[in-house]
């Protein structure tokens, strides 16, 4: 992965965000979330959740769905309110069972 950011390539397009976040150690993601929480008011839009999701794969011949097994899933949906009143909303759904990583 190219780590040299240029003005034209930074920030990366939203379609690439998951790739960037997945490459960073969880401790760094949680540290960044802590820094943001010190600056902004963080409000849960929905309560953070974790559990198991079924991994489905369609059969190539008949297109029937087969369940390969369960995978851990965490979900969070938050709103950030900056000191100047600016609001941003977003969420994360991860193949991981750590709610703290999904919410930050």
Image (cartoon, rainbow, N blue to C red):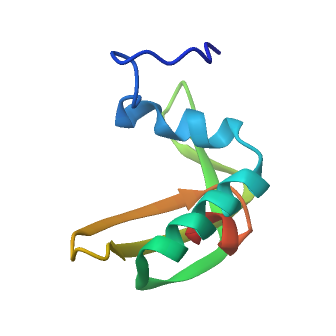
| Image vertical order of residue 28 relative to residue 41, above or below | above
Residue located 60% across and 57% down the image:
94
Residue located 39% across and 31% down the image:
11
The reply, left or right, for residue 10 in relation to residue 55 is left
x%, y% of residue 6? 43, 15
Q: Quadrant of residue 20?
A: top right
Residue located 21% across and 70% down the image:
86
x%, y% of residue 19? 57, 33
> In which quadrant will I find the N terminus?
top right
x%, y% of residue 8? 33, 15
Q: Quadrant of residue 22?
A: top right
> In which quadrant will I find the C terminus?
bottom right
Does residue 58 appear anywhere in the picture? no
The reply, left or right, for residue 20 in relation to residue 27 is left
Q: Nearer the viewer, residue 91 or 85?
A: 85
Does residue 26 appear anywhere in the picture? yes
Residue located 59% across and 80% down the image:
49
x%, y% of residue 38? 53, 75
Q: Nearer the viewer, residue 16 or 63?
A: 16
| Image vertical order of residue 83 relative to residue 54, above or below | below
Count numbered badges in the picture: 0
| Image vertical order of residue 45 relative to residue 62, above or below | below
């Amino acid at each position: 992965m190219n780590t040299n950011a240029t003005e034209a390539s930074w920030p990366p397009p939203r379609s690439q965000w998951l790739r960037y976040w997945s490459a960073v150690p969880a401790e760094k993601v949680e540290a960044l979330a802590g820094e943001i929480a010190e600056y902004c008011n963080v409000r849960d839009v929905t309560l953070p959740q974790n559990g198991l999701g079924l991994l489905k794969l369609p059969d190539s011949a008949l297109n029937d769905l087969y369940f390969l097994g369960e995978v851990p899933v965490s979900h969070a949906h938050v709103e950030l309110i900056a000191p100047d009143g600016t609001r941003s909303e977003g969420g994360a759904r991860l193949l991981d069972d750590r709610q703290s990583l999904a919410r930050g």
